[in-house]
Amino acid sequence: MDRPLKIVHCVEGYPPSQGGMAEVVRQLSERMAAQGHHVTVFTSAHAERPDGVLNGVHVRGFAVTGNMVRGMHGAVDAYREAVMRSQADVVVLFAAQQWATDALIDRLGDLPGRKLFVPTGFSGLNDAAYADYFRRMPEWLQAMDLNIFHSTTYQDVVFARAHGAVRSTLIPNGAAEEEFNGPPTVDVRRELGIGAAPLIVHVGSYTGLKGQREAMAIHTEADVPGAVLLLIGNGNARLEQQYRTHWRFLRIRALARWRRRRVIFREWDRERTVAAMKQADLFLFPSQVECSPIVLFESAAAGVPFLASEAGNAAEIAAWTGAGATIRGERDPAGRVHVDVRTGARLLTEWMRDPQRREQAGAAGRAAWAARFTWARITRQYLDAYGSTLTAPRP
């Protein structure tokens, strides 16, 4: 664009809240603000983040919970009024089924500027409770000036195509140059006392859906002598404790100990998490639910090969980057992916016994990331998309 834009990003979670979409919006918002655009993020209130300017981004929180299906509670009217009075050139709604989108999606005609939607997966598409919600979704998609998808194959874009939402574009997720250019800043192998042992890393929140239990099962069944599985959480020790005391988790942990498989749990800050990814031999991510997992782009950026479930567009990311492979699994009625542990163990054994294969995949992933999946490049794509709506006819 040849002039600064007034941009509003609406998203349920924003740092210090954790989550993939929070990270996406942070990366985009801070980079756009650094380029001279006026960026406001309307999001959930957070006790550790007062309203104000944060790294160049105007952030305002609202005490709202729920969504259109479960009911929305709190300062919904104040949120709507703030967006409607923002005089934005562009209003972007991130993620379906979350209050920040649902409070506005049936009032699009009242919003200023051009309206863009980043659905991020439609996780409730197969949930009977959301049947009426998704019956209305085609009209909302068609009312947008542009819909932005992270995949060409995942269920949200397939749904959109089937219902005639032709104003759409693909913009993938990515990883940050500032984090993944350069050597690790912390020697996590030394901190953990594992030396040169084969290191398999998993990163994810303890929601029960990110595949920690499956990763432990695969690690336990695989034949990789001396290997260490490092499970890194997102800093929520309470949630980790709840997960680790569940009987299913305790059962697989006991089996791992019986088979002398080493598993290490850590709640680490971002610096150590990135350092661990860079020093890993392989990244293992058998998650049940995803849209377009950022951690796979980060694995590629780290030059480390990955094995992942088929959740979200993981297979597409593997094809785009050449950095890894997916583990066969089955989908339950809710759309969650459950990996075949024996297949995962076989693949993990094969990859860990083949350093040349891992080196080639890591190098391919690193090159693909540098060429296509840095946040600087992706921010440019978003800005181009925003600008295109300002000159296009309204729907």
Image: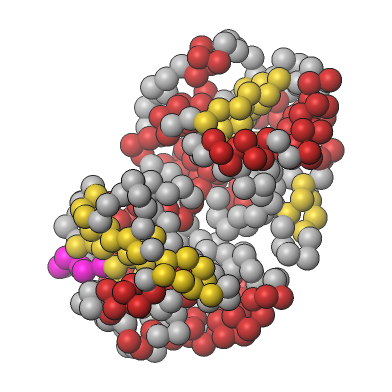
Q: Nearer the viewer, residue 142 or 96?
A: 96
Q: Nearer the viewer, residue 193 or 184?
A: 193
Magenta span main SS: loop
| Identity of the residue drawn at 67% across and 47% down | 208
- Measured along the vertical axis of the image, is residue 165 above or below residue 300? below
Locate the C terminus and report the quarter of the image it occupies. bottom left
Percent coordinates x, y for residue 15 in the rendering:
37, 49
| Identity of the residue drawn at 64% across and 69% down | 124
Res 54 seen here? yes
Q: Nearer the viewer, residue 243 or 42?
A: 243
| Identity of the residue drawn at 84% across and 38% down | 342
Q: Is 111 included in the stretch rendered in magenta?
A: no
- Magenta stretch bounds: 3-7
Q: Report whether 101 appears left or right of 248.
A: left
Locate the N terminus and report the quarter of the image it occupies. bottom left
Splitting the image into 4 quarters, where does residue 116 fall? bottom left
Percent coordinates x, y for residue 297 in the rendering:
51, 44
Q: Report whether 90 appears left or right of 97.
A: left
Percent coordinates x, y for residue 70 in the rendering:
58, 73
Splitting the image into 4 quarters, where does residue 184 fall? top left
Splitting the image into 4 quarters, where does residue 132 fall? bottom right
| Identity of the residue drawn at 33% across and 46% down | 48
Percent coordinates x, y for residue 348 in the rendering:
74, 32
